[in-house]
Image: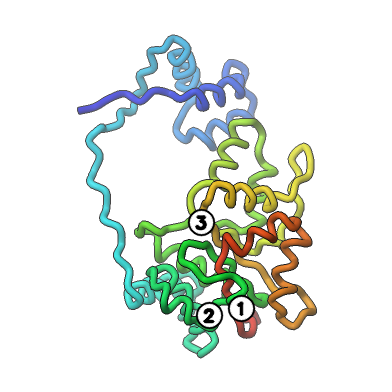
Amino acid sequence: MEETKKIGRRKYDFYKSLDLENISEDALEKLETFCKGTTVSQAIKEMQEFEQGIYKPAKIIETEKPEPKEPLKLTKESLWKLFTAAYRKSEGVSYSKEYQSLENIKPLIYYFIGDEENFKKCKAVSLKSEPSLKKGLLIIGGYGNGKTSALKALEASLIDSNIKFKGFTANEVVNAYEALNNEIEKTEFWDLMCTGTRYFDDVLTEREANNYGKVDLFKDILEKRYANNKRTYISINYKDGTNQDLDAGLQQLAERYGSRVYDRLFAMFNIIEFKGKSFRK
């Protein structure tokens, strides 16, 4: 059985914003970016048929959807195997089996397989925030000691599981925000940033975003995600010149985003300390 898919109001508004009858090169580029494979004439026809209430697209959506894949069942051994393979593929080297590297990754393995008892026993888990698998992760460490590469490999490892997440660098978020051109794009940006499980890498290193007015994006993102009770992972560096002092590292978030965000950290996050020297040469 088949049914037609109706164009949505947001897509119609997007078409209207482009002025398809007198489309510019910039508007044409936006059409190709956000509606891949759609020509100007097709977009005009879709817009007209929407107005008439008789939209019948060429592409048909099947109502009989394929059976969803069964969520990946994870054990310590299976996740470790997936993680080390993903790490080697991404970084071109095997994950270090030195004591400190294993102590760093251990709580993340236990966290993602749901082993709260062993997660709480890990040395890297700070008791400044009560450990709980219901919370997200705040990973703090020195520059270049494997936070980013470890989370990148875990993101790839969990892609077929029911606990997958999507990662962005803090500066990617700022760049995306600064490229927004209309209300539709802004709505889609905030939907992406404030729904689902997200990982934001190198928070605190991003510049202040500017899109017809300056804004500290992660103040708003973290507050919205807290309000929406969305699971969040972030990584930050220790504060320079503090000899890897945890309190000083966390206090940076208050200094940048305000006490409101800082006060919510301990309800939102387990705090994981990545120790050890930088891998960068």
Frontmost residue, 150 versus 27: 150
Residue linked to disc 2:
104
Instruction: Report which residue position mark 3 lands on.
Output: 231
In the picture, measured across the screen, residue 222 lies left or right of residue 121, that is right
- Tag in front: 3 or 2: 3
Task: Please determine whether, in this image, residue 138 is positioned above or below residue 97.
Answer: above
The label number, if any, that marks residue 145 in the structure image: 1
Task: Name above or below for residue 244 compared with residue 129.
Answer: below
Q: Residue at x 35, y 76 (%)?
A: 76
Q: Residue furthest front?
A: 130
Which of the image's four quarters has the N terminus?
top left
Q: Are marks 3 and 2 in contact (CB under 8 Å)?
A: no
Quick check: marks 2 and 1 in contact, CB under 8 Å? yes
**Mark toward the viewer: 3 or 1:** 3
Check disc 2 and give the amino acid type: Asn
Q: Secondary structure at mark 2?
A: helix
Q: Nearer the viewer, residue 107 or 168?
A: 107
Q: Residue at x 40, y 63 (%)?
A: 158
Tell which circle, 3 or 1, labels the residue nearer the N-terminal end. 1
Judge by depth and name the residue closer to the eye, 137 or 157: 137
Q: Residue at x 55, y 41 (%)?
A: 191
Residue 164: image quadrant is: bottom left
Q: Tell me the amino acid under the disc marked 3.
A: Arg
Q: Between disc 3 and disc 2, whose residue precedes?
A: 2
Quarter occupied by the C terminus: bottom right
Residue 203 lies left or right of residue 15; in this view the side is right
**Dot 3: within a 10 Å radius of its alpha carbon, few (fewer than 14), some, or many (20 or more) residues?**
many
Please give the name of the residue rendered at 46% of the width and 79% of the height, measured from the top-left corner: 106
Q: Position of residue 264 (x, y in %)?
A: 64, 58
SS at badge 3: loop
